[in-house]
Amino acid sequence: MNEFYSISTNENLPETEFELRNLGKQMVSATIGKPSRGGWGERTYSSQTFYRETTTKDYDEQFAYKLMNFQPVYDLEKILNFHKDFYIKKQNGKKDEFEKHIKYVVYPLIVKKRNSETQQELITDWLDKNMTDKKKNNGKLRMDFGDINSPTQFQINSDNSVQTQKIEYSNEDISKIFELIRKDLKGINNSESQELSAEIEKTESKLNNGKDIKTRLLIIGELIKDIGIGTFTSLLSSPIYEMVKPMLGI
């Protein structure tokens, strides 16, 4: 079994159900066929089936398959929320643990599948909304963004202060920030830097397509803090850094 999902006791569960199908204790790992000839020269076939124990990964694969085939695709968050609610309420699990499982286990399975761009975007948007809300609440940070090309007002609430700033920035400013971060990441090869690079690439794509990137910028800021702000010497020494700090939640 897999604690992250609501799994039916019915091994013949319809594909339309939100629950995952019970895979049983064993699964077929391989079936090997062998041709032979009978006493009259006729060709016959025999086969041997091999079984293996069902693993938690099998349920991750099944969940990824269900996400890929879920209809209507624009309601994909319904099945994500269904299993999230199950994990929190029935398994007494933590919300952020489920989100991490989707981000680091399920999402990579989706990326490997062909024609999964829509599912990737919907899952990423779901993660943006859920994980960024948590980060903003934990840090007691509230940021009001306007158009990426217009003057923006930021209001930052913390335990000790309330500060309001008006900042003007453009797409070129954001692109410059990404360029500086990439420069600082050269020579660093670990999972955190790879995750930050991938996040910047996705955010840049959204920016170029005119989409809202405010939650993406906050996630990038969290990743920068995870790696260590002192690592980003090019970013810190740039005059633009002070302007973008509120956007990054730093």
Image (tube, grey):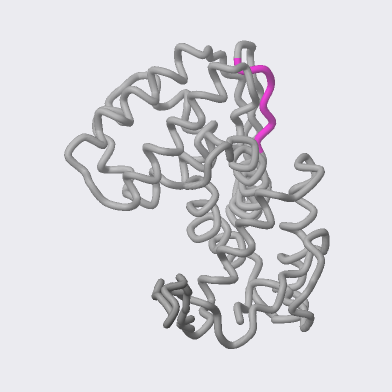
Q: Which residues are magenta?
A: 143-148
Q: Position of residue 73 (x, y in %)?
A: 76, 42
Q: Is residue 50 above or below residue 43?
A: below
**Residue 157 seen anywhere in this rendered image of the structure:** no
The residue furthest front is: 40
x, y percent for residue 184: 25, 33
In magenta stretch: residue 238: no
Type of secondary structure dominating the magenta stretch: loop
Q: Position of residue 119 (x, y in %)?
A: 64, 42
In-image side of 211 versus 171 (left or right)? right
Q: Position of residue 187 (x, y in %)?
A: 17, 39
Note whether 96 is above or below 86 in the view shown: above
Name, please, the residue furthest toward the bottom.
25
Measured along the vertical axis of the image, is residue 23 above or below residue 83? below
Between 181 and 69, the one lying in front of the other is 69
Residue 139 is left or right of residue 42, and the answer is right
